[in-house]
Image (spheres, rainbow, N blue to C red):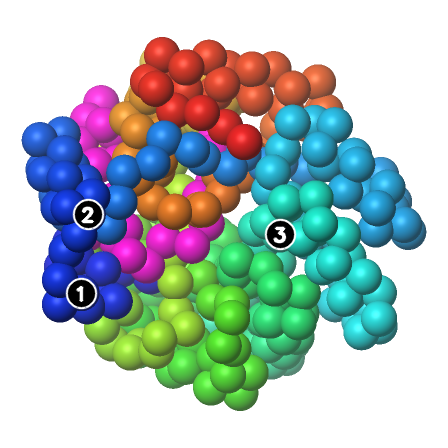
Amino acid sequence: MRKTTTISRRQFTKLSLTGSAAMLAGSAMGLGAFAPGISNLTRLGGPVWGDFKDPNEWAKAVKAKGYSAALCPVSVGADEQTIKSFAKAAKEANIIIAEVGAWSNPISSDEEARKNAIKKCKDSLALAELIGASCCVNVTGSRGNSIVGPHPDNLKKETFDMIVQVTREIIDEIKPTRTFFALESLPWSYPDSVESYLDLIKAIDRKALAVNLDPVNMINSPSKYYNNSALIKECFEKLGPYIKNCHAKDIKLRDAYTIHFDDVTLGTGIIDFKTYLTCLSKLKDIPLMMEHMNTSEEYDKAAITLKSIGKESGVQFY
């Protein structure tokens, strides 16, 4: 999920004039050389409500929202023909299936829960591979019993080692060739920073490992909160080649004692979406998936907000 350098893991022996110009432009923006080319096009996506049996009706509903990226429309256990029919409909409508959610706790202190979570991750990764999703995404979990809860052991060395072992097991059993197993950060669990992302990527050492970038989840101090523009740039500089999917939500520091951050409607918090969209637009075909809102109307308003910011920043959604 992280990278120790700012260059792509695909090694180029030569740079075209376009590629060279892109790197120079990226450097001028303070973004380093994470992007092989300049593009101002970004895919936007979010949930689409409804129980869709017909793949073409699902695709129409996605496009009606103005999206070109979507959550996986089928669940683990669906038959192969159904999975492939949705994959076909997505391709024909120019929709990227951005992610298969494997939300579970594969490092739970409860042995049975841990085994079930690991199985869910494997099954979800297999689904992502079959349907051609950008990634299968999960958090690394918690040493407690909840999926994402804080725990005093979450940031210990032995927990880091457990994450490495579990993630390797998931990837090695499925052996994906066209999708990735992506880890998402949490404020109180690995990876909780760009540095720990990089450490995990190096330790796990699997080509099918990827980053599901959500800068909000790495904001765990007022310093990162007020300097989130710099944090976002650092994420793309150092993690860019590993990013396969991005999340968009917002955050606000509550005016109360002690420190407390609230997950708020996109556009009502402090996240510098201008910087976020500008950085993201340098990567090719990486979806931006809106999340953590409660209604379809809230997502519609958030999409309008992002498109407005994109227009100001020279970034177009398609």
Instruction: Indicate left or right for 26 with 185 as reference.
Output: left
Please tell me whether residue 254 is drawn above or below residue 317 in the rendered image. Answer: above
Please tell me whether residue 238 is drawn above or below residue 50 in the rendered image. Answer: below
Instruction: Indicate left or right for 96 with 274 as reference.
Output: right
Q: Which residue is mark 1?
A: 12
Q: Secondary structure at mark 3?
A: strand
* Residue type indicated by callout 1: Phe
User: Which label number is shown at residue 137?
Assistant: none
Q: Which residue is mark 3?
A: 97
Whether residue 235 can be seen here: no
User: Which label number is shown at residue 19?
Assistant: 2
Instruction: Indicate left or right for 116 with 157 as reference.
Output: right
In the image, residue 4 lies at what x, y percent?
15, 62
Asked if the magenta segment contains residue 230, the reply would be yes
In the image, residue 66 lies at what x, y percent?
65, 27
Label 2 packing within 10 angstroms: few (<14), some (14-19), many (20+): some
- Asked if the residue under mark 2 is in contact with the one under mark 1, i.e. CB atoms within 8 Å, the reply is yes
Whether residue 70 can be seen here: yes
